[in-house]
Image: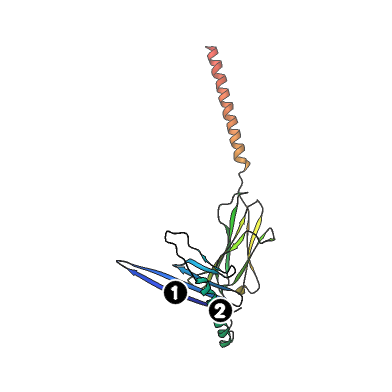
Amino acid sequence: MELYKIILALTIVLSTDAEFVHEDFIIGICSDTEAERMIGFDEEELWHADFNQKKGVETLPDFGDPISFPGFYERSVQNMAICRSNLAKRIKGFKSPPPEMDAPETSIYPKNDVQLGFKNTLICHVTGFYPPSVSISWTKNNVNVTEDMSLSQYRPRNDGTYNIFSTLKFTPDEGDIYSCTVNHRALRGQPQTKTWDVDVDLPGVGPAVFCGVGLTLGLLGVATGTFFLVKGNNCN
């Protein structure tokens, strides 16, 4: 699979007494099987085209003066057609040179502190890979999971590689084992798998027994003292 990428950046300097540098960027990525177009500001995503749902997705929270992107999806479709046309020309012109590749690094961790029986989210973070085309799959106790999972857009890094996040909603039970498997061209047919098992520290019986024995001895001490106090008063 060949890849063609366009990154447009606009740096804006606002000057009063101090200088503030901001950066708008547009990323367009295409291959023979994938396409992505994203608009961002200062390393934050503002909008991306969802070519599966055939619509644009605004990813900013609601503000008093919201930002909209009318017509951006239609233009993105046109840009992807141009991107694929340019890709074909470059493949022919450069006689398909072997692409540069960086293998991904994968980590898996829960979003929140884990409590048995309470819903949580597992995060599979894949970073440092190029080109931006990976597949991510999940298993629970060695059984493939296809529900309650999601996949983010590709996010560029300053070094030219990419990040992506996959999440899985789950309810932890003691002893369950989850895994996240990543496939990328740079791995050369050897998928990268990270596992995470539900291991929640449960309170032991030692402290409870110790407290129970201490309380019993305390009560016996109070009873013994009261007995001798009463006997002493009777002697007087």
Residue at image location 56% in from the left, 85% down from the top: 89
Q: Is residue 162 visible?
A: yes
**Residue type at tag 1:** Ala
Q: Closest to the observer: 194 or 232?
A: 194
Q: Secondary structure at mark 1?
A: strand
Where is residue 141 shown, x and y percent of the image? 69, 58
Where is residue 213 shown, x and y percent of the image? 61, 33
**Label 1 with label 2: CB-CB less than 8 Å:** no
* Picture quadrant of residue 214: top right
Q: Which residue is mark 1?
A: 9
Where is residue 144 shown, x and y percent of the image? 68, 62
**Residue type at tag 2:** Ala
Q: How is the image coloured?
A: rainbow
Q: Is residue 58 above or below residue 225?
A: below
Q: Closest to the observer: 102 or 157?
A: 157
Q: Which residue is mark 2?
A: 81
Residue at image location 56% in from the left, 76% down from the top: 30
On the picture, is 162 further left or further right than 170? Answer: left
